[in-house]
């Protein structure tokens, strides 16, 4: 058990707790060997005997330890002492992008683009090492006191040995890509989608999709076209709007195919904001919208269960998804919806009556 003042690894003195998550706690510590302050992420005690959680923790350490980039929170050390699993990371003094957006309501176009460029460069370094973040969101982006932007928490990242990875882990639902919501492929273009949503939030001060339940939001990512950020902030330049649209295409093949491409367009938007240079591919009907099948619903529920259980740090917690879906069904009766949505609700009704 971690206590303030204790020494782990014969060098890291625990000073104070500075954060907590579903699987781990983060402490500020002093490295007596190198005489510097660091952040120490410690796996929570209730998970330290669970092989599945320990495996995820080790994967995070192994993935992140190979990354060295100015826009990534660097990992210095990994250890296990008397059942205490820990990762030693760079200590970044600052605030999360989420808190920064909340503080300013919304960011200026230039500031939002500048932050997005730094984030994309950090993620590009990870992708070049065959590592996909899978949980890009403002909460996982830190702005240091000197203005440096850093991506953190590769907690569900995995080193890839091929161009694509199949993942059963869904990122935070407000930022998750359609393929993650369905439990399908997750590759570099999933991070592109999540960064596009993050850019949307920086520009407008809100997320593109919201709802009363996580299931409802996930369905919107799959079915509904993303609104234009210029609907909320009219002065957003045309090129920036198009960058957001290209990042958040439903089909991964219609998004930016790499962070390098995205970074180039972001930089160009600073020089010629109203120019028409973003190369868009016209989506066909299947690429833009699709009906939700029974399999889709099962996958969405499965991914939401996994993510919410991990976020709360509670094993075996009962997620009230049945009530969520029932509520969506009742709300759906009150308004006209597309045929695909009606078919979805009929399928869900039959399923829950079984």
Image (spheres, grey):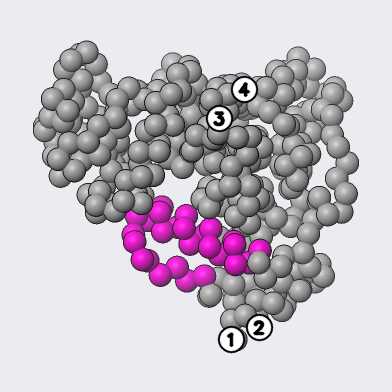
Name the residue that disc number 3 marks. Answer: 130
Please tell me whether residue 60 is drawn above or below residue 295 in the rendered image. Answer: above
Whole-percent x, y for residue 60 in the image: 40, 37
How far apart marks 1 and 2 lie (CA) works out to: 7 Å
Does the stretch in magenta take in 72? no
Question: Camera-side residue: 63 or 110?
Answer: 63
Quadrant holding the N terminus: top left
Please tell me whether residue 250 is drawn above or below residue 246 in the rendered image. Answer: below
Q: Which residues are magenta?
A: 296-321
Give SS at disc 2: helix
Left or right of 206: which side holds 56? Answer: left
How far apart marks 4 and 2 lie (CA) works out to: 47 Å
Name the residue that disc number 4 marks. Answer: 117
Q: Are marks 4 and 2 in contact (CB under 8 Å)?
A: no
Name the residue that disc number 2 marks. Answer: 350
Q: Main secondary structure of the magenta part?
A: helix
**Residue at (25, 32) in percent of width and height:** 79
Q: Quadrant of residue 230?
A: top right
Q: Please say whether residue 188 is visible from this viewpoint.
A: no
Q: Which label is found at residue 354?
A: 1
Mark 3, Cα crowd under 10 Å, few <14 / some 14-19 / many 20+, is: many
4 vs 2, front mark: 2
Q: Earlier in the sequence, mark 2 or mark 3?
A: 3
Q: Earlier in the sequence, mark 1 or mark 3?
A: 3
Whole-percent x, y for residue 245 in the image: 76, 39
Give SS at disc 1: loop
**Residue at (29, 53) in percent of width and height:** 50
Q: Are marks 1 and 2 in contact (CB under 8 Å)?
A: yes
How far apart marks 2 and 3 lie (CA) works out to: 42 Å
Q: Which label is found at residue 299?
A: none
């Amino acid at each position: 058990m971690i206590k303030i003042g204790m020494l782990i690894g014969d060098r890291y003195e625990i000073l104070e707790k500075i954060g907590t998550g579903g699987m781990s706690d983060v402490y500020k510590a002093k490295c007596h060997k190198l005489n510097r302050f660091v952040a120490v992420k410690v796996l929570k005690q209730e998970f330290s005997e669970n092989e599945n959680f320990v495996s995820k923790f080790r994967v995070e350490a192994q993935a992140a330890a190979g990354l060295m980039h100015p826009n990534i929170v660097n990992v210095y050390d990994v250890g296990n002492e008397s059942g205490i699993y820990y990762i030693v990371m760079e200590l970044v003094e600052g605030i999360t992008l989420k808190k920064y957006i909340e503080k300013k309501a919304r960011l200026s176009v230039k500031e939002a683009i500048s932050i997005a460029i730094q984030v994309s460069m950090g993620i590009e370094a990870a992708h070049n090492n065959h590592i996909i973040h899978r949980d890009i969101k403002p909460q996982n982006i830190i702005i240091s006191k000197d203005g440096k932007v850093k991506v953190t928490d590769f907690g569900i990242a995995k080193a890839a040995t091929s161009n694509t990875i199949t993942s059963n882990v869904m990122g935070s639902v407000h930022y998750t890509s359609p393929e993650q919501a369905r439990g399908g492929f997750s590759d570099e273009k999933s991070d592109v989608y999540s960064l596009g949503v993050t850019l949307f939030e920086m520009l407008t001060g809100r997320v593109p999709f919201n709802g009363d339940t996580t299931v409802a939001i996930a369905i919107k990512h799959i079915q509904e076209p993303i609104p234009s950020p210029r609907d909320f902030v009219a002065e957003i330049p045309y090129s920036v709007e198009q960058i957001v649209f290209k990042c958040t295409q439903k089909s991964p093949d219609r998004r930016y195919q790499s962070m390098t491409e995205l970074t180039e367009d972001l930089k160009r938007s600073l020089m010629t904001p109203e120019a028409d240079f973003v190369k868009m591919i016209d989506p066909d009907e299947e690429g833009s919208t699709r009906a939700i099948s029974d399999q889709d619903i099962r996958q969405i529920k499965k991914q939401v269960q996994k993510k919410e259980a991990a976020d709360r740090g509670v094993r075996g917690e009962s997620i009230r998804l049945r009530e969520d879906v029932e509520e969506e069904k009742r709300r759906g009766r009150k308004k006209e919806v597309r045929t695909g949505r009606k078919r979805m609700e009929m399928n869900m009704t039959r399923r829950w009556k079984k």
